[in-house]
Image (cartoon, rainbow, N blue to C red):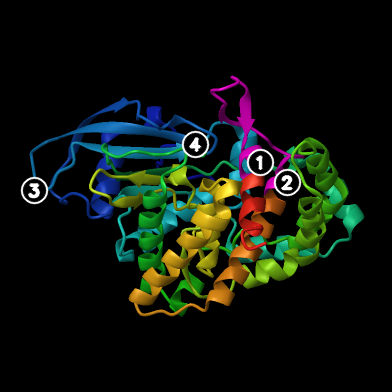
């Protein structure tokens, strides 16, 4: 990479009043004749150092007061964990979120944190990423398996710097996957998603947005190779104590249909959040839902967002009741906004999304598998795939 010519902080310790002043002015978050003259960095409840990055609260002082000044902002940076960072940069997750806030956040009709300033170094470009992915995907299964035998070799982070400032929303509650939101909270989230989807329905200008990418992968054939020959046996053995014969038979269907499922999900319908897990949602006391973390936003079919939310939050035994009810609630909310979505089509995309997400989760069992949390009952570390696997299969079998 060419030598960086401008200053961009890449950690909380590198934040400076000068950079914050320039970034906030450019974002329209402060007048051009005002200055940030001091800052204090402090921990953020629910933030800190996580899998994806580091998030802190920054308390600001100005040379003079001005209307609508913010006493605090939230600053987000890339993780210092090299493998995690390399994996996220493979999806351009950091750059995409910054682009979303710069290009699209002000157009979104639902509550998202306000963009307060940002900057990052340029990346490789969509064309280079797409061509490289296509070349790898065209290789045979043996090459796919050889290339992914030690995937960490390819997850090397770049020297790019990323810094994002967003509105600080101190009040609200985030629910992790171990203790997901209530049925009413999920219904409210689906209403927000329907509003988002309706607002951008059929907006072909999204096809040119640098903030958006296809969901899940640009290399579906490589994903299937890893699933068939490496990950499927791991999952079947690991989950042997609860997998039924019917659920095991789903594994072949997942592999057989993955490439078609990806095409179905990526139909250019509307702006999708792409990652609406409960821990990316902030539930306010007045019932409003704030959508956080836009690093996987996509121009795709809205059924993907519905499937992602419900498969993260509903236990298998509730899929046939609460899950089916909430899917209908989403359709009704969308219809109320002027967009009728055929029930069969929505179910088809939800099923395709569940299969595709499950394949990704199972592939993750053989690559990078960090702890998600701790099971309070037994005190054991819990893996993300062990939480989501049963829920995804439950939603797939909701109408069985």
Residue drawn at point x = 36 percent, y = 32 percent: 56
Magenta-colored stretch includes residue 240? no
* Outermost residue toward the right in this view: 142
Residue 362 badge:
2
Q: What distance separates the C-alpha of mark 3 from that of mark 2?
A: 51 Å
- Bounds of the magenta segment: 361-388
Query: What residue did someone put label 4 on?
Result: 53
Task: Out of 282 and 71, give the one closest to the viewer.
Answer: 282
Local crowd size for mark 1, using a 10 Å CA cut-off: few (<14), some (14–19), many (≥20): many
Local crowd size for mark 3, using a 10 Å CA cut-off: few (<14), some (14–19), many (≥20): few
Task: Out of 158 and 263, give the one closest to the viewer.
Answer: 263
Q: Are marks 2 and 1 in contact (CB under 8 Å)?
A: yes
Q: Earlier in the sequence, mark 3 or mark 1?
A: 3
The vertical placement of 223 against 337, above or below, is above
Q: What distance separates the C-alpha of mark 4 from that of mark 1?
A: 20 Å
Q: Is residue 128 visible?
A: no
The nearer-to-camera label among 4 and 1 is: 1
Q: Secondary structure at mark 4?
A: strand
Q: Are marks 3 and 1 in contact (CB under 8 Å)?
A: no
């Amino acid at each position: 990479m060419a030598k960086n010519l401008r200053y961009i902080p890449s950690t909380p310790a590198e934040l400076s009043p000068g950079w914050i002043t320039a970034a906030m002015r450019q974002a329209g978050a402060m007048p051009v004749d005002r200055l940030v003259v001091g800052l204090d960095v402090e921990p953020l409840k629910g933030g800190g150092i996580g899998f994806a990055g580091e998030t802190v609260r920054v308390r600001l002082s100005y040379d003079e007061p001005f209307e609508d000044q913010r006493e605090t902002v939230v600053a987000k940076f890339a993780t210092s964990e090299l493998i995690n960072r390399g994996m996220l940069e493979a999806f351009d997750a950091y750059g995409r979120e910054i682009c979303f806030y710069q290009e699209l956040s002000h157009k979104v009709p639902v509550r998202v944190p306000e963009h307060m300033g940002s900057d990052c170094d340029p990346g490789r470009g969509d064309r280079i990423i797409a061509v490289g992915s296509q070349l790898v995907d065209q290789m045979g299964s043996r090459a796919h398996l050889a290339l992914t035998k030690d995937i960490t070799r390819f997850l090397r982070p770049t020297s790019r710097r990323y810094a994002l400032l967003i509105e600080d929303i101190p009040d609200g509650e985030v629910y992790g996957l171990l203790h997901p939101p209530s049925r009413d909270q999920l219904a409210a989230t689906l209403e927000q998603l329907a509003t988002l989807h309706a607002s951008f329905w059929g907006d072909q200008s999204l096809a040119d947005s640098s903030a958006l990418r296809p969901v899940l992968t640009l290399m579906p054939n490589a994903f299937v190779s890893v699933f068939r020959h490496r990950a499927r046996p791991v999952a079947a053995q690991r989950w042997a104590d609860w997998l039924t014969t019917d659920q095991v038979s789903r594994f072949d269907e997942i592999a057989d249909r993955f490439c078609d499922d990806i095409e179905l999900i990526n139909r250019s319908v509307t702006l999708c959040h792409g990652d609406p897990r409960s821990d990316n949602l902030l539930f306010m006391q007045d019932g409003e839902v704030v959508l956080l973390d836009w690093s996987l936003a996509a121009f795709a079919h809205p059924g993907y967002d519905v499937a992602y939310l419900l498969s993260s939050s509903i236990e298998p035994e509730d899929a046939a009741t609460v899950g089916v009810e909430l899917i209908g609630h989403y359709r009704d909310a969308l219809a109320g906004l002027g967009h009728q979505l055929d029930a069969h089509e929505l179910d088809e995309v939800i099923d395709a999304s569940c299969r595709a997400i499950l394949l990704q989760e199972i592939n993750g069992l053989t690559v990078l598998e960090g702890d998600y949390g701790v099971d309070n009952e037994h005190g054991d570390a819990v893996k993300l795939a062990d939480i989501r696997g049963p829920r995804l299969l439950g939603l797939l079998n909701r109408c069985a």
